[in-house]
Image (cartoon, rainbow, N blue to C red):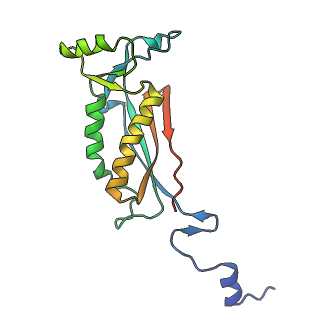
Amino acid sequence: MLDVTEQTISEVFPPYKPGETAAGREIYRCTKTYDHNEGLSCCFRQWPARHSHCRLIHGYALAFAFRFATSRLDQHNWCFDFGGMKQVKQWLHHMFDHTMLVAGDDPQLSVFRYLSDQGLVNLRVLPQVGCEALAKIVFDHVAQYVDQQTAGRVWLEAVEVKEHQGNSAAYQRDHRPS
């Protein structure tokens, strides 16, 4: 039989410090999604994909998933208060609700600008177009917003953009909290 004293227990199992584990820092995560039924129906084309039908104008009801992380919960024991996503949701609707997304280097950009001037498309000119590029554009916008709203306590870990149930792309940025 092993005789275990309190001193031995405290040496083997040091006192718990919030935010730490034996393997390192604790990370809490939460996810907020806006599904295909959110009404984020936009169209775009990937003009450099000359070998594919994706070079043509086509559209999707996009869905978005945001994964947030923190090493410290707030006073409500939440990673991130989803009530703070109202401005993000408004921005998503501004960018992707019945809009035409065109890359700034699209050789037909003047045609799309003409259609916009005629009131035929609600044009958004972006640095790049495509599901992967949209994931990064959305990530950059929302990551900055989350950092400001939480004074750096929470970070955006990843954004996934779904064209439909069969296709999605994600963007994430490594975040190593101090």
Along the horizontal axis of the image, is 61 left or right of 173? left
58 or 118: which is nearer to us?
118
The residue drawn where x is 30% and y is 35% is 92
**In this picture, is 73 found above or below 32?**
below
- Residue 9 % position (x, y): 68, 84
**Residue 142 in which image quadrant:** top left
Say whether residue 28 is left or right of residue 117.
right
Residue 164 in view here: no
Residue 35 image offset from top left, x and y in percent = 37, 35
Is 118 placed above or below 28 here?
above
Q: Nearer the viewer, residue 105 or 87?
A: 105
Q: Does 151 sit left or right of 117 as displayed?
A: right
Q: Is residue 176 left or right of residue 32?
A: right
| Tally of numbered tags | 0
- In percent of width and height, residue 41 lies at 31, 25
Q: From the image, which quarter does the N terminus lie in?
A: bottom right
Residue 128 picture location, percent across and down: 42, 26
Question: From this viewpoint, is residue 2 visible?
Answer: yes
Above or below — where is 142 with respect to 128?
Answer: below
Q: Pick whichever, 41 or 174, lies toward us.
A: 174
Task: Tell me: residue 76, above or below residue 44.
Answer: below
Q: Which residue is at 46% across, 37% downward?
A: 160
Residue at 38%, 60% in the rendered image: 78
